[in-house]
Image (cartoon, rainbow, N blue to C red):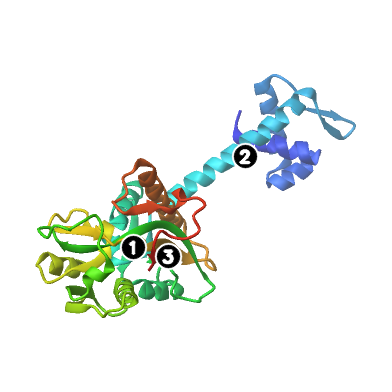
Amino acid sequence: MQLQQLAYFVAVAEARHFTQAAERMRVAQPSLSKQIKALEADLGAPLFSRARGNVTLTPAGEALLPLARRILADADTARQEVAQLAGLRRGRVRLGATPSLCAGLMADALARFHRAYPGIELLVEEGGSRDLVRALARGQLDLSLIIMPLQSDDPSLVTEEILRENLVVAAPSHERPKGPYMEIEALRGRQMVMFRPGYDLRDATLAACRQAGFEPRFAVQGGEMDAVLRFVEAGLGVAVVPSMVLDGRPGLSGTPLAPPGLSRTIALAQRKDVEPTRAAQAFRETLLSFVVEAGHEGTLPQGVDLIAELPGQTDPPGEAF
């Protein structure tokens, strides 16, 4: 029994006419009839009754028809799946992420994706959320991890919130915190290391300090994430940073701000007016599965929560930046 024979059988069963079925299948009618006879011989039973020019199904044909349709549908699904996988042997995905996410979450997700699809080229753009959103809107990125709220009124952009992360005060590890939390007021008069203008974390820190009634003092400012962390390690001052960036940095300690504290929401953004490539879809699925698995297994960095595990909560635990 061959798939082509089953396809010819279904065509005749639906047309109830050999010549019309042959035209539909784009094959000569004698060849189609020959394949149907071979199928009947293989099954040991006639499939069609040919009486006075009328073609009808025999009981054996009636029994075979739904099975043949199912086999052909499964074969078509298999072909499509293999074709999609074959299409992922080559290609590219253009990804954006903030520096803190590149150093943590993105690196592990990229490693998993690369193991599954080693032929896909990964292009990563690192920058602040505002810059990444602009690049996404211009079509320069396929996907981007950004910090909410979305800094754009472009209706073509859509976001999926995936994680909520606490912001902590980073200090050299030899400076023992006085308690489990730090009041924002404790930053008054302290030397601080500050990110460059336009950085989301800079805006978050300035807003929190001003809300508490003071302007922060800067020992040094203008750095990206890695530079800020190194300046703190060197003792130049403290900095408000995402909790996940302190993983693997024994020279730093992080103290959460007193409740309600500060937090930020991490989202995956993409354009909804452009059909994503198969490679981009595969990366989105890889990233989300990685995040969900880590959330369920409790392996997310300290201070990071899976938003999907916070049902019914309408407000974030702290003011989100």
**Left or right of 293 on screen, residue 41:** right
Quick one: 130 or 110, which is closer to the camera?
130
Outermost residue, right side: 52
Q: What element carries label 2?
A: helix
Residue at left offset 34%, top offset 54%: 304
Quick one: 315 or 148, which is closer to the camera?
315
- Pick the quarter of the image with the N terminus: top right
Separation of marks 2 and 3 at Cα, in angstroms: 32 Å
Q: Residues within 10 Å of mark 2 (few under 14, many from 20)?
A: few
- Pick the quarter of the image with the C terminus: bottom left
Label 1 amino acid?
Answer: Gly
Disc 2 vs disc 1: Cβ atoms closer than 8 Å? no
Q: Is mark 3 on a helix, strand or loop?
A: loop
Q: Residue 237: which disc?
A: none
Residue pointed to by mark 3? 142
Quick one: 259 or 80, which is closer to the camera?
259
Label 3 amino acid?
Answer: Asp
Residue 143 figure quarter: bottom left
Q: Residues within 10 Å of mark 1 (few under 14, many from 20)?
A: some
Residue pointed to by mark 1? 261
